[in-house]
Amino acid sequence: MNDKTSESSQGGTSSTDPSQMKPLLMEQGGPLQDDDIDEEGLKSSSSSGNTANASYLESIFLDNPEFYTQALKFLFCFCGLQASYLTWGYMQELIMTTKFIPTEHVPSGKFPSAAFCVFSNRFLAVIVAMIAVKIRHGAVFSNNAAPLLSFTPCALSNTMSSWSQYASLKYVSFPVQTIFKSSKVIPVMVMGLLLKGTKYPFSQYMEATLITIGVAVFSLASKSTDKDTTTELIGLVFLIAYVSFDSFTSQWQDKIYQTYGKANVDPYQMMLGVNTSAIIITTAGLILSGDFPIVIEFLKANPSVFQYNVITAITSASGQLCIYYTIKEFGPIVFTIIMTTRQMISICISSVIFGHAMNVYSLFGAVIVFGVLFYQIKNKYTSSTKKRKVPKSPSR
């Protein structure tokens, strides 16, 4: 004992056998180290935690699978529409309000033809739709349940709506644009009553009115413009035409789904039918108006405008796919509400990027809109849950 103590003090380190300080823990398969115990304990704890979380999420989903499936579809539609049309709206305004290099026939430097913007959007959409329909159905037109002529009314209204919106940008102030764009939900409901005899409850009209007020307050309070704020009478005519034609378009598309069956008309066929008729209408309009040579001259002098038109056409095509799928799954009212709230999201993004502060009025408008939307979601969930809990009568 004294020898061991002496050796330890001379070497400066303890020579105590580690096995005396940490006894081996024996399992049937042999010794198990502390590190192995910690790893296995963590794995077991993590595994049980993940299993518990997975079971909890599964129980929530199984409690009301229809609601959550629809919620995921809605989220897809919402994100697709927002991404497509936030970009499309920015490019549209850039094309129609920017002063470019003047040409002989366009001394003002403003893009000369709203109809050409509509034409470029429809041209790419037709190509995308033809490829998609060919892949899914084996033929472009022959396997379509709905005849091509049935899409012509909404193609005409869609073309006129787009043209009116482009044209109005030159003649109306931002506040007037905001009020008209915010009020689209109510005209869509009225158009549904006229076209299909759809009767909406009074509560839905109240919700639409509150959304309109909320979006208008939010937009007017959050955004200012340095551009000319005068509004001409022709601009108001264009905006009225835009809202009217746009309301007709979504309701007519919903009518096609109801007439020929949602299972028989998919979003690609709807896109093909609408844009085939629209491309004929816009091409005829460009030829009769003589805009083609003027636009070509302008594009040669301003190559960037062509690039803007290409970006607009791409986002328009992706947006149309989302539109037709949304109307098929949720109807024209939900689609219109999504598009109405788009300008709120646009302003929020602008505030983050450019550091614009939002005042109390804009926040008040946001509370109104999202309060109504959450109220609608809650009612949808409650209604769906009640349907699942209703006991089925025993079969005899």
Image: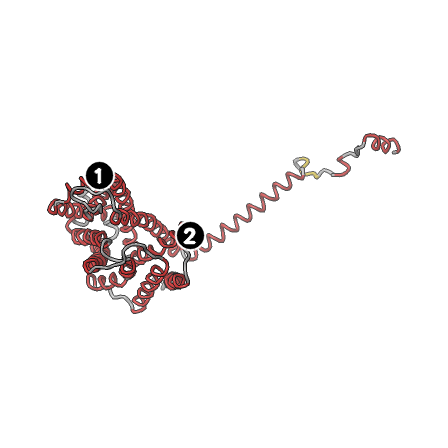
Q: Give the camera-side residue of 182 and 220.
A: 220
Residue 369 in which image quadrant: bottom left
Residue 395 in which image quadrant: bottom left
Percent across and percent down for residue 158 are 20, 52
Tell whether 153 sits left or right of 345. left
Q: Separation of disc 2 and disc 1 at Cα?
A: 35 Å
Percent across and percent down for residue 78 are 34, 52
Residue on which disc 1 sits: 301
Q: Secondary structure at mark 2?
A: loop
Residue type, label 2: Gly
- In the displayed structure, 108 sits above or below 383; it is above
Q: Give the camera-side residue of 93 and 43.
A: 93
- In this picture the colour scheme is secondary structure
Q: Report whether residue 41 is seen.
A: yes
- In the displayed structure, 304 sits above or below 361; it is above
Residue 66 in which image quadrant: bottom left
Compare marks 2 and 1 and give the one earlier in the sequence.
1
Q: Residues within 10 Å of mark 1 (few under 14, many from 20)?
A: some
Which of the labelled discs sits on residue 330, or is there none? none
Quadrant into which the N terminus falls? top right
Q: Residues within 10 Å of mark 2 (few under 14, many from 20)?
A: few
Residue type, label 1: Ala
Q: Secondary structure at mark 1?
A: helix
Residue on which disc 2 sits: 355
Q: Give the camera-side residue of 271 and 344.
A: 344
The single residue placed furthest to the left in the displayed view is: 288
